Amino acid sequence: MIDRKPVFQNAINWMLDRGWKRLGAKRKQFDQSLFEHTLIELDVALQLLPILKQPSHFNLTTEEEQILVVSLVAHDIGKERPEWQDYLLGRRDFVSDVDPELTRAALPDLCSALGFSGLHSKVMAVIENCVNLHMSHERRDANVVLAIFQGADRWYTLANLVYHIDNICSAKGVFEAKAAFERSILAKHLRVTYHQVSIRGVSTTALHRAALDSFQEAGWTPLLHFSDATLYVCSAAKPVLEPRPDQIEARLVQILKEATGKDVTQFIVGSPTANILPKPDLFEYSEILMYLEAATRKIGRKSFAMAYEREKKRVASGRPAATGRGKSKAEVIEDYWARKGKTGERYSSEMDRDAERISTAHPNILAFKLFKAAMKPDFIGDGGVRIARQEYEAVFGAGSWDSLLSTSTLMPAQDMAKTVDLFWQLPGQQFGLAVRTLEELAPEKRTELLVDTLAQIAGKVYAAIPNPPTRATLARKMAASFIHDLVSPAVQVDLSELARQQMEFYAVSKSFAGKQTKKARYICPVCNTKFEEGVRAKADFIDNPESHTNRGIAHGPFGYITLCKSCYYERILRQLLLGERAAELIIVFPRMNVGPGAGELLVRKAEALYNRAYALMVGDTDDPDRRLWLAFTSFIAEQMMQQDLYRLAPEQFVDLLTYRSSEENRRKNRRELEKRLQEQYEGNLEAANDEWGRDFKTWAEATEAVYANQVADPIARQIRADVYRLYPQMQLVCQTPHMIILPVNYTIKLKDDSEANAALRRTFVALLLGLNLDASVAIVRDSDQIDFQGGEGVAFVPAVATVRELIGSNWVPLSEAERWLRALGIASILANAGQYSVRSGLFEVLTAPTAGHVLRRIEQKKAMERQPLTYRDITYLRVFAEVMQR
Amino acid sequence: MRVPIFVRVERFDLDSVGSEIETVRDCFDRYLDSYPVKSARSKHSLMGPVGKVLQEARTGKWDAESLAGYALNIHLSNPKAKGYISQESREALQEGVERLLKLLKEIPVTAQDKIVDRVDYGLYFLRRAKGLEWLETIRKEFTKFLREKYGSPEKLAEAWGGKPEDYGADFAKIPYPSKRMFAEATSQKKDDIIEFVKQAELKGYELVEEEEEEM
């Protein structure tokens, strides 16, 4: 029996040594390197062998298994010849991809590389026949007769297996692969099925995971993964059932529960002046205490008082009290006095005192606001509201609930009179405290007490109602939405009925776009599906929610667009995973298809790559000045020049993407770190040493240790993170090899980049990743629809007309990938050297008619600075001239 | 009713004459290999008579022989040429002029400036690159000479002064032995440059003065 892992790894090494990653195997329907193509076929064969070797199927011996493996790895060896590569690229007429002599010469080396050293010459003849007759156009009479004489045993069956596996793996998309399977000799032995999804984004990765797990649990073996589907097989002798959509949905709920189970406090507590609870879907009743605490931290205790003091000084110097359209602080206090039935002089000592009181009360006001939002009937039902009223009034007094409900967004005078004063006037005795009223307590203590009190009331309410708000509900709602993206297995729909409904919605949706009414019929502006009940878009999760679209009527008012629930949940999920709204998504998926073994490798590589990137982003290294920034294409290009991208380990690859802060910034950061550390410990090194369990003699020594991440104290680490801004700017969403997503919280562009320059930088990064991971990579904006499925090329070219015209297509094909990677990298370096415009320099270099034009520019700029042209400049220009053929 | 007339102007594809442009460049490049350049600092000087040829070719008033003669006259007027041009150079110059004028006749007038521009800057790049590569070759020879003589940057630092890191781990930071470097050098450093120049001349190298100024 063949040991799968070493065979797989040895085959990879053998192909890498022959440079197969740089050679093409497919170009007509989709791009695939010889390496990928062969690896996929080997992968599929290794998946199938455990079934095929069974006596009820082909009853393969170990020797026959080895023959099959060697034949599959070698079957396209003729494609490595330069003449065939020229044919593939359309530079010459047809030439066969079968080369018997080359096969004969390579087989001994391949067999030994795979560890199949015991194969004797007779077996080699069988392999040769399998390899040389795997293509139907090579099965001429003479060749077959020759093979019969040379070969023995079951060479024909084995050659057929090679032929059919080749056909299945060469199919474009899951349907063609399934059809190729059903036409093959494998169809009698194996049952085949598939799952397919409609690609949406981050949620698609979870849906793939749910489907894949469900199929595997049911006994299916995954054979080929596509970005939108997986092909599965099982033995026809022991058929198994397909999982039902509801089983996949149940699994999806579990996956989404894990994804949504993290700390979401930052999303829950919104703006004090707008919506305090912007994402009610994420609310989890058991976390109410955390939310209330977070709300009290949203606003400081001094801001109102400081603004009042500034205003007082302004008035004293004869300037107006209010600087904007809003009320002055004095007017706010007068409003408060009016509510309390008081009067007084402006800026008197009494007003000063109330300014201080209102200022101190702000964290309390926010706690009341959040509590009120959490006690809405939508959340807890009418029954819950009744209990809330009862419990609240039991603490704050009769009528206090109505007072609370009559408050709105942050209005200090009203909030003070209707909520805070009621709380502050409560007797200390009620809480077992030795003060007359709670107002006498220290502000921190008072806030803590309020938070506990409100949390207790909420706890009683949640305990008394049947379905308290929880994120588990959100996971279920999300799963119920996302399961509609599962195309197969799915409940059969009447296509003509579906089309009729879509037409009907399309016909009426125009008048509803930009409006939210109960009778509305919408077409989602993101995913184009029909729906009746959606979510009003907010800038929080989509760009320009108010901008008019031609999906609405051209006249009359236009409000906000409405998204379907699935698109809304998709965006919520992205925010949850990244911790904030993503600016761009880096999407990695197989160029066409990938076998389970190579898929696993892809996932492992992506994880290793991300782990290293994460360590750099959060400063889990001894050098926080080393940063990861994908837009610095010139730095990346300089480091990449001497490297073989195809053989770089993920960690080494990430190191190529890093840069080191300038000497000046390094010094500045170091000074800041020392200053912040001294401030934290009030200049007392002994206290710091006690906290850290260390024995530093000077602050410089201590700072050096903190800098190098050698002090494990969380406070010291937090200060280091703050000074060096060590926070993750990227996340990894990687469930299966179908689609790996890296949401990034910044746009991959330099500050003043034009659209064209930014598009070129994104293409460069996509090419880098695509070539290193052997995958297709697209970098798109968060609000863009993902409408590609694999097979298009190595890197997506953003939709900027001039850039697409320059590159010549929407995707950089494999045959052009290395050339464009070098061209973009070199152009970044030359744009800096020639001090081209910061806005469009990269584009200008790439469109320069000759390298001489760029050279002249560099020379002129250097002459102005009295710098000589160097040999290095010429080296770069030579590469530029070569790759751009100018 | 009159039949509407549609006019579609197709943009000339410059790449379609890429190989012809390259041939013209190569001819002029071969010619310039033996042209005694006055100073490598200016494009005008580096391109010699070819600059004038390209300028005049745009006017469309010249035939190949007259233009080649014009260029030859400029060549011979250069004092460094000492009134001489080899036969191969003359032939290369003439071939370049002929091919250039032929090419310009075959293409639309609107594309002529762009073609000449490509020849001009493409050639300039070739010449400039050759010059700097030549300097780099000599620099490497100089480095090799010092490595053989001193063996390590530490020993070189002892002889020349300074720190070993100024010269790089593998003498990689040693610059081209320029006139300025020679003028600023003292004692052993000066002696080493003199010794190297002698060896270089024995090997057939010619240390071009003007190019030295680049360094």
Image: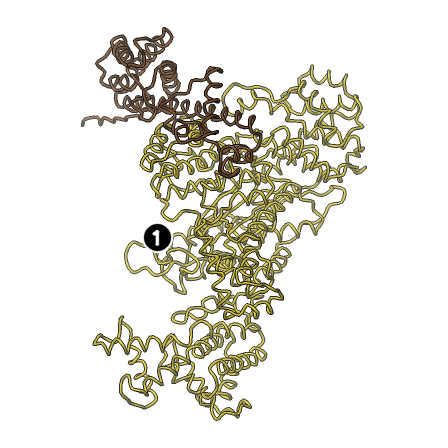
Chain colours: A yellow, B brown
Tell me the quarter of the image containing the C terminus of chain B.
top left
Relative to B204, say whether A36 is above or below.
below
Q: Secondary structure at mark 1?
A: loop
Could you tell me which quadrant the N terminus of chain B lies in? top left
Q: Is residue A247 left or right of residue B96?
A: right
| Relative side of A281 to A874, left or right | right
Q: Amino acid at mark 1?
A: Thr
Q: Name the chain under label 1.
A: A
Note whether residue A200 is visible: no
Q: Is residue B122 visible?
A: yes
Q: Which residue appears farthest toward the front when viewing the image?
A: B187
The residue closer to the viewer here, A638 or A502, is: A638
Residue B42 at what x, y percent from top left? 31, 26
In the rendered image, which residue does mark 1 sit on?
A549
Query: Total of numbered circles in the picture?
Result: 1
What residue is drawn where x is 33% and y is 19%?
B37
Residue A170: percent from the left, percent from the top?
60, 33
In this rendered view, identify the residue nearer to me: A818 or A825.
A825
Horizontal relation, residue B114 to residue A528: left or right: left
Image point 51% across, 63% down: which residue? A719
Q: Residue A631's spot in the image, x, y percent?
A: 45, 46
